[in-house]
Amino acid sequence: MKDDRRHRYDGACHDSRVVDMEAVLSPESGRIAFGKVRSNRGAPRCDSVTVEELEAVFPAQWAELGRSIKAGTYRPHPLRRVEIPKADGGVRKLGIPSVMDRVVQQALAQALATIFEPRFSPSSFAYRPGRSAIDAVKSIQARLRHDDGFSALHLDIRSFFDSVDHGLVRDHLSGQPVTAEVLDLVDVSIRCGVLEKGLVRSSAAGIPQGSPLSPLLANVVLDSFDRWLTRRHVAFARYADDLLLLVPSLAEGRRLIEEAADFLSRVLRLELNKEKTRLGHWSRASFLGFGFRADAAGGVRRCVSPESLAACRAEVENLAAANGGGPERAIVETRRFLSGWTAYYRHTEFAEDIREPYAVARDRVRMCRWAAWESAENRQRELICLGIDPESAAAAAREIPPPLPLLRCAMPDESFRGHGLADPLAPAWPGEPGRQAAARMEYGGSIPRSTSHARIRWGDSLLWFLRRLFRSRLLRVRLETCRSRRGFLPRPSAIGIEIGGFCFRFRL
């Protein structure tokens, strides 16, 4: 039985290493795999076992798990289904293994990577050490700088991770120096099923997104497609199932679409999504959220694609509009989103791409604060406290829609620095009040305001201070009355003044 399952290794590999169970289940391999799983800080599966709980007993658990794998009794837990909304309206289905199963799959990926990593195409960038998405974008940009006469072809494989054939995965692995026991362990890991609505659904095809082993298997399956494109002398970059090709003409691009669809269907049993496949000039291409734009000198520079900017603006507006915690909550949620967005798109070569989302976020927070003030009286008072002269504040308090230019003057960009929403590319002010006041934008709208710096009259300030004091209930005045001598109307007898916790009574 064991001879029938023996891997088909034809000796074509120049590397003498063979991936066997000893390489996967060694204590050193388990220690490294657990360290990577712990650093990823993944959520627990439905068994609720966390990385911290497993850490104390991991050596004993790893040894016990190794014995069950060698005995053939190991069965991974079903995956926990997590759905993440996509920009196009669909959902991306993730399958989250248990912590111990993640360690096993990470150890498998480490051992298999020693064989496959040196063989992958230089144009493959996903899930590889020392390579990232921005490296894939830069490779396309370098080719365009050398020759900008190309058209861009963006290929989209329909539901790649959900459509990978399990038999095809074994076929790609069995021709390499991998033992049959390791192949069986890979089979068990990708066929473990998914827990959905309390029921375990078997997986007839697909490799789960969220598994440490799936990225390597995706590269193994698509490596034959990379070699096919290389033989055709096509310049391309691939990040997982996202491919951008540079073709010399539109006619060549259309012909390549048909041939690629035939190759994917016939060899890899995958389907090309022709509805999402795009062919056009390279300046209209979008790859991994980035685009390319010609500068004044005729060079090619990378930028954030218009689709990514539009999605960012929509997300910022939703965070500010749909947040029920007021402006401060909107600031926290918007800052958290923009910090992650900026960390990815900081490689753009156009400063406006980074500044624009922050400007949109500041405007949304200003409008959120305006809505929180609710009444015209509150708005007038707050505008005066923010440095707007009383005449302009009184005229603006009843404006519909909110007077955004005046709000920009009352709440300048620099005032958002402490909240993390100021211009990320602007230097910080040295803290001088005069310079911060000078940084306020001039308001050129229909609401009148003085050309000089707005000053608050002391009478207005005293009036607003007294109103705030009475509304805060820190100061309360009580009038005591008694019956008049004739018994018709009450007359005042004393005045009581409460300040905080103290009470003073004055008889009349």
Image (cartoon, rainbow, N blue to C red):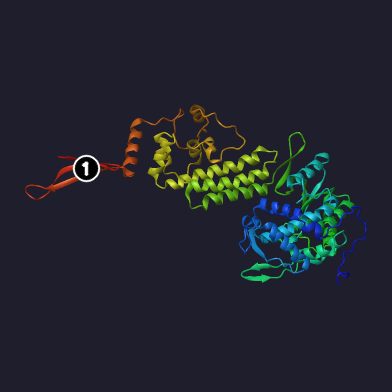
Location of residue 16 in the rendering, given as x and y in whole percent from the top left corner: 90, 54
Q: Is residue 119 left or right of residue 408?
A: right
Q: Is residue 384 left or right of residue 80?
A: left
Residue designated by label 1: 496
State the residue in front, 102 or 127.
102
Callout 1 secondary element:
strand
Quadrant in which the C terminus is drawn: top left
Binning the other alpha carbons within 10 Å of mark 1 as few (below 14), some (14 to 19) or many (20 upward) gives: some
The residue depicted at 66 percent of the width and 70 percent of the height is 200
Location of residue 111 in the rendering, given as x and y in whole percent from the top left corner: 80, 55
State the residue in front, 404 or 171.
171
Q: Is residue 367 visible?
A: yes
Q: Quadrant of residue 384?
A: top left
Q: Is residue 328 left or right of residue 205?
A: left
Quadrant in which the N terminus is drawn: bottom right
The residue depicted at 66 percent of the width and 37 percent of the height is 351
